[in-house]
Structure formats: structure tokens, C-alpha cells
Amino acid sequence: MSSMNMVQALNSAMDVMLTRDPDVLIFGEDVGYFGGVFRCTAGLQAKHGRRRVFDAPIAEGGIVAAAVGMGAYGLRPVVEIQFADYILPAFDQLVSEASRLRYRSGGEFTAPITVRSPCGGGIHGGQTHSQSPEALFTHISGLKTVMPSNPYDAKGLLIAAIEDNDPVIFLEPKRLYNGPFDGYHDRPLQPWAAHPAGEVPDDYYRIELGKAAIARAGEAVTVLTYGTMLHVSLAAVAECGIDAEVIDLRTLFPLDIETISASIRKTGRCVIVHEASRTSGFGAELGQSVQEQCFFHLEAPILRVTGWDTPYPHAQEWQYFPGPKRVVHALKRVMED
């Protein structure tokens, strides 16, 4: 076991898989010699060579298109889109090619590709470096969508994603790379070294895709969340003193509806927290799934705490970012109904 931040855990996952499987390779913008804009691939080219870890042109559509072709011929490419905001030029390749390949070929070909991309705000990135586009991918049949909240999960989930025979969108909350951010930007950064999930095995292990984790057990209300908002939600629960059960979804699709349903049948209340904008955000689908599964167990309306339906503002970042105060307000409201 080693103490790792999320960058180091992701790097370790790729290192392990490059060593274990000669069909794994890594490419993207600046991921080779430079080691990636956030240094997630640092040192991998020097260790595994330029044929296994290499740079690509600034052409997201071309990066994913090449990965689909490589996957169809038996390789397992792991590609990095430098910021999730810039994944849209590759959207056609993901929707029309990667997600459909197994179906359209009758199972003769697959697209075992992993698309890594930093997402989310809280780093003063403004409107083009702060978006959370996860709902776009959960809508596409054939894609799996993952978003870890800590280094331990990040390594295990990334290994599982690389080993999966279908395309996986692996979104990394960049605000969590160096520590478990609780939403208070004016407080000192807490390092992963002081957090239990910062202890990460050095060797191979995997966390099955499609399995949520109960981050905090409780009886009064269920909080459904993922990514950075897990830590914001835990901070809010600690502040308000409500005995909430906090569930870290980890994988958005496939969704662990069994764990979610069991929790809400116990608590009878539900608050959904995510950073992406509200309208048609993943919380809308999540709320409807809860309604279908747990309607007769709900004692209050499902509430959502989300980003606003605007571009991510640079000057008003902390008004947009769903902080603990907004989550506390929702928890108190749901308990009053």
C-alpha cells in the first residue's frame, strides 16, 4: 500500500495495465513526453516506450476514431481528452461508432476503449474548462460512464474500465486530483494523505463497474451523489447533524439501482446532488428511477441540488458550484415534508 493522490492512483492503474497486457496502449494530447496536462501519465512513456504511450494531434475526433479502429483489431487503447469540455468533437465517433460496434457487427467486433477526461469546476477554469457532461453519455446505449470520488476507487475502477470489452467514458473530477474537496474554497486544502481512501495498493486490483458504495450509513434520508459532490455532501451532513445515508454511485451507467432502492426503502427520503446543470442532468433520470422503484416508500418529494442552467461562470464560480450550504438547505427541507 502507498499513500497516493488521485493523479498518482490513475497513473498507477495505467502502469499496472501496460505491464500486464501488451495490447494496452495510451495516447492523447501531451500524454507522452510531457505526461499530460495534469501529469496523470507522467513517466509512462519513459518506462513503456513511445510505441505504447504517445502523443496525438489536437484532434479529438481523430483520437477517438483511431481508438475505435484499434479496439476493433484487438488492442485496448486508453485515450485522454484533455478536458471534458473538448470531448464534443469526438461525440459522433463515440455515439455512431464506438457504442454501436458490438451491435452492428453481431458481436464480431467490439470497442474495448477507455476515454479518460478531467471534468467539473472549482479550479477557476471558466466556461470552457469546468463542465460536467456525464448526462450526455448516460443517454447513449452501448457506453458505460464512470466517475470516481477518491484515489482508491479511481485506480480500481480504471483497471476495470480498461479490461471491459465495451467503451467506457471515465470522467475524473479535476478538483479532487490533489485532495477531497468539501466545497469550502476559502479553507486550506486537505491532502489525500490524510484520508483513508488515499491508501492505495501498489499492485493490481479492480472494482466492478456498476456497483455503488455506501460512503456513510444513515436512517433519515438518502443522498445520491458522485464525484466531487460526494465530499460536499458528507460535509453538509456533518454540519446539519441529520442522519443521512450517503451513496457514492461511482458508475452512472450501468446504475446500481439495487443499492439505491434498498437505501430509500429504509429512509423514505431522497436528495440528489450533482455539479452539472439542472435541466436534463443525470439527477433527472436518477430521480425518475427512484420514483419508479420506491414510490410507495417515499415520504417526501425527491429534491435535487445541482449547478445552474447557465454556462459555468468564472467570476461567480462559487455561486454556481453546489456547496454544502445548498445541500444542508435541501436536507432540512426534505425532512420537513
Image (spheres, rainbow, N blue to C red):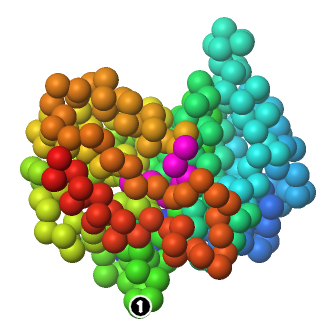
Residue at left 76%, top 26%? 96
Residue 70 is one of the magenta-drawn residues: no
Q: Is residue 99 or residue 74 the one in the foreground?
A: 99
Residue at left 80%, top 61%? 29
Position of the N terminus, as image quadrant, is: bottom left
- Kind of residue sitting beneath label 1: Pro
Q: Position of residue 282 (x, y in %)?
A: 49, 42
Q: Which residue is mark 1?
A: 188
Lateral position of residue 80 relative to residue 92, left or right: left
Question: Compared to 307, does 39 lie above or below?
Answer: below
Q: Is residue 214 or residue 328 the one in the foreground?
A: 328
Lateral position of residue 226 relative to residue 145, left or right: left
Q: Position of residue 189 (x, y in %)?
A: 43, 86
Q: Can residue 44 be seen in the rendering of this structure? A: no
Residue 200 placement: quadrant: bottom left
Q: Secondary structure at mark 1?
A: loop
Question: Compared to 48, does 88 lie above or below?
Answer: above
Binning the other alpha carbons within 10 Å of mark 1 as few (below 14), some (14 to 19) or many (20 upward) gives: few
- The residue most toward the top is 106
Q: Is residue 308 or residue 33 the one in the foreground?
A: 308
Residue at left 41%, top 70%? 323
Q: Position of residue 21 (x, y in %)?
A: 59, 45
Kindly report the secondary structure that dominates the magenta region of the rendered protein.
Answer: strand
Lateral position of residue 60 relative to residue 292, left or right: right
Residue 277 is one of the magenta-drawn residues: yes
Q: Which residues are magenta?
A: 273-279
Q: Position of residue 72 (x, y in %)?
A: 74, 27
Q: Can residue 131 be seen in the rendering of this structure? A: yes
